[in-house]
Amino acid sequence: MSSLNFFKIFLLFLVIEANIPNRFAEGACATVRRTIHVVNNLTPDTPQLDVHCYSKNDDFTNITLSIGEEFKWTFCSNVLPTTLYACHLWWFPKEKSFDAYKERLFKWTTENLYWIAKPDGIYFADGNHVQNPEKKFDWEG
């Protein structure tokens, strides 16, 4: 492929990325639709879980989850791998901030991604392994 053709393709991707908003009308998505789930699987009779998740374009203000509740949102990833969502979880007096979704080429194989708060830390599972989540982070504080 000539360098001129490569440059034209690259420019086309830049134009598409600049003109496609991160959120589309309900049901329409030019890329893969993903759903992030944040689940409170903490010990009963303890403080509730406070959650704040956000991206460059979205800010889900503080949400309080009781035991067994989940907060979820669905989005369309960007055409170029630039989609990023971060979350901050508080379980008094403990807390943890982390990237809940960071787009990488060919990394995610399912549409549902789960972050599960447990007494000993934060666990992650994709839709294929939700019964066996993997511990990713310890609580801080």
Image (spheres, rainbow, N blue to C red):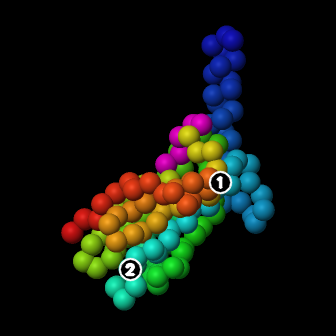
Secondary element type, mark 1: loop
Q: Nearer the viewer, residue 98 or 125?
A: 125
Rendered residue at 34%/85% (across/down): 46
The residue labelled by disc 2 is 43
Q: Relative to residue 88, is residue 84 drawn left or right?
A: right
Residue that sits furthest to the bottom in the current view: 45
Image coordinates of residue 38 in percent, x first then y, are 50, 68
Secondary element type, mark 2: loop
Q: Which of labels 1 and 2 is toward the front?
A: 2
- Residue 15 lies in quadrant: top right
Q: CA distance from mark 1 to mark 2?
A: 28 Å
The residue range painted magenta reads 102-106
Label 2 environment density (alpha carbons within 10 Å; few <14, some 14–19, many ≥20): few
Q: Nearer the viewer, residue 67 or 105?
A: 67
| Amino acid type at mark 1 | Glu
Q: Relative to residue 30, is residue 138 drawn left or right?
A: left
The residue labelled by disc 1 is 111
